[in-house]
Image (tube, helix red, strand yellow):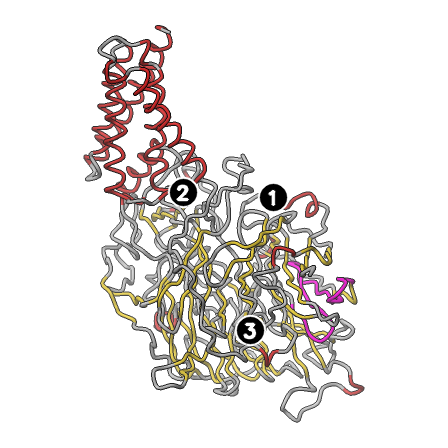
Amino acid sequence: MRVLTLLIGAVLALIGIAVAGLGIKLAWLGGSWYYVLAGALMVASGICLVRRKIAATWLALLLLAFTLVWSLWEVGFDFWQLVPRLMTFIVIALVLTLLVPALHGNRRLLGAGPRGVVCLALVASIAGIGYGMFQPHPTVVAEPGATAKVIAPEAGVADGNDWTAYGRNTHGERFAQFDQINKANVKDLQVAWTFHTGDMAINGAEYQGTPLKVDDTVYLCSPLNNVFALDPITGAQKWKFDAHIKETPANAGWKRCRGVGYFDADKATASATPAAGGECRQRIVTTTVDARLIELDAKTGKLCESFGENGVVDLLKGIGPNTDGSYYLTSAPLVAGDVIVVGGKINDNLKTDEPSGVTRGFDVRTGELLWAWDARNPKRGVPLPEGELYPKESPNFWGTAAFDEKLGLVYIPTGNQTPDFWNGNRHEGSDEYNDSIVAIDVKTGVDAWHFRTANNDMFDYDVSAQPILYDLPNKEGGTTPVIIAMTKRGQIFVLDRRDGKPVFPVEQRKVATDGVPGMRISPTQPYSQLSVGAEKLKESDMWGATVFDQLLCRIDFKEMRWEGEFTPIVEGQRTLIYPGYYGGINWGGGAIDASTGTLIVNDIRMAQWGRFIKREKAKEIGLKPSTEGEYSEQLGTPWGVERSMFVSPLGVPCFKPPFGTMTAIDLTTGKTKWQVPMGSIQDAPVHGIVPGVNMPLGMPTMGGPLVTKGGLTFFHGTLDYYIRALDNDSGKELWRGRLPVGGQGAPMSYVGRDGKQYVVITVGGATRTNTNDNRGRIARRGEIMRQAVLTTC
């Protein structure tokens, strides 16, 4: 026993010295003094234990009490914040209490009885924390028994039993009025059918699509832009179209197809007719990662030869020389009446002189270019004369647009002029239209209004989510037609879609402006009354799996530049970036329960850091340039940029959980009804180690939700291998189903010819892990799963 106390005491003292030493550094940086005092108590307790004095146990209990008081003062009863603060010291106190019989001194207050009570309390605390680690901890708890009031009973009915556009309709609602699957029977969901595309989701090919269902066919695309038509009841393939995409240096590591469009000439109002013989009266519209716009006969999968040149339009026309393939498309095209609206993806951060970000409208029947909208020439509208090129370096639109058929307006979300982190070379139109919602006349291509969600963007805060159009009840007893713009900043702007004026208040707040010479930095930025996960980080928000990496994260935080969101990047010193450039709310967007006016949206909460670096120095230290990695050259600007995730030495985020949530906002009041963590650590590798336990910490999310009138929100864009159904009124998880691999798309739902409701999801692997391993056994065989589930009752 003497050797044991000597060993434990020495280790405790050494750990205490390290904690105190690092604590002194933190305090010198202006941080908390707690760690200095805690380290000193650990050292004193360790020395007493080496000397076998009972004071060691009293000091350990004092340290625990001191830590408890400090923790509650700093973070209140936030469970995940308390765990790393308390667990280490509870274990220390338990060990030293168990060692009391081997120690010298007055044991009257720590006799067998009291000691047993203390040990029991400490063990119970450990057990309680252990239990709590496997329970969800909502950030906003729903009011008990609260039920959303139905204010639009007929919502969704006009769309029938189908899902005819990326967001179910051109309003992007992602709401299905079906209630066959509901809160009472969702637990009975079973797999109905599985379809394998045969395209492997590896080497940059990501399955992020949402299928369509029209009449008696499901349509979907793979990351290689192959299109499939399936029987919606059995999953049997009806036809396949092979796009035969051309691989370029840019798309070699970035292949996506988030969805296709649909056009029905028999239901269109225009008098024009499609090809003779009745072919292509119903059409599938798709784009490719080698910049083509294609139309297929929805019945046969054959090219519509009357469209473009034998069914294909070359989207590089007017873009200019593009030898590196830096212009291509990944998101679902919008079919706005008789017009197809497409934007394009442009590589971030590699260089200046990137292609135009022009948005174009094409005749859905002929493929004729009807109009073109560009931020550098926003009022032109008409296409360029033959042989001319659209101006380079304009903000692009790479997500999916929305369309109001009554107003005749298309709403596009824009990005910014690249490179993202250096904005000293921005053009006037780029500054005016970056990170905006732009309302474009579908007939003329001229913008009616625009609203900027960020001023002088310098953090890749592209607006990429499809906007949601909704008729919001107003105080006068009518409705206001609004557009809901969800942003990477976590700000949610609700605007009157007739003129772009805010319906929920927006204010311009002052931000830091101390950047490097040449940067264009706005002194203010817009902030909405509605936001998700956009709170300013502070030192007490720093986290870690243990007290030790939490301390190191605090030091890193204090050493970084951080005056709040939009703190400019400089050379040398790291600048914290939060919300991060992945979001907030990324391309997955949200959904609205149109029957109750409840907006439901998932988000990402991952901080990053960045700093400018001379390209010569980056080369010296071996940084490898890329568009998405930890170093980008930004050729044509004064600086390269080095950036990374803000994580602890153990590889876990340096800031408090959750790292991804699902949030419900009542748009009739602006109140957040509930907010719950989404996803567990079960399948998320850290340094190659997969935890394998369902601990619902709340992980970064991708894709978007599906909301149904059955009172359910379906979601599967987490880092673990599950699809979940949440209660729309409380956020409580009512069911989850295990998948073969992770998913990234948004679910969709329809009622088949058999009268049953189906929920269909794309399952091809978790997102952006820089490995093919998490694609799973099925995916590695090239059998990417598409799954439908239904009730068994």
Q: Is residue 269 magenta?
A: no
Image location of residue 491, percent across then percent down: 36, 64
Q: Residue at x 36, y 17 (%)?
A: 98
Residue that carries the numbered disc 3 in the rendered image: 342
- Which quadrant holds the N terminus? top left
Q: Earlier in the sequence, mark 1 or mark 3?
A: 3
Q: Residue furthest right?
A: 277
Residue that carries the numbered disc 1 in the rendered image: 774
Image location of residue 598, percent across then percent down: 45, 69
Image location of residue 250, percent across then percent down: 56, 56
Residue 653 numbered mark, or none:
2
Task: Identify residue type, mark 2.
Answer: Pro
> Hey, which quadrant is residue 56 in on the image?
top left
Spatial CA span between label 2 and label 1: 20 Å
Spatial CA span between label 1 and label 3: 32 Å
Q: Is residue 777 left or right of residue 689?
A: right
- Relative height, residue 98 to residue 243 (above, below): above
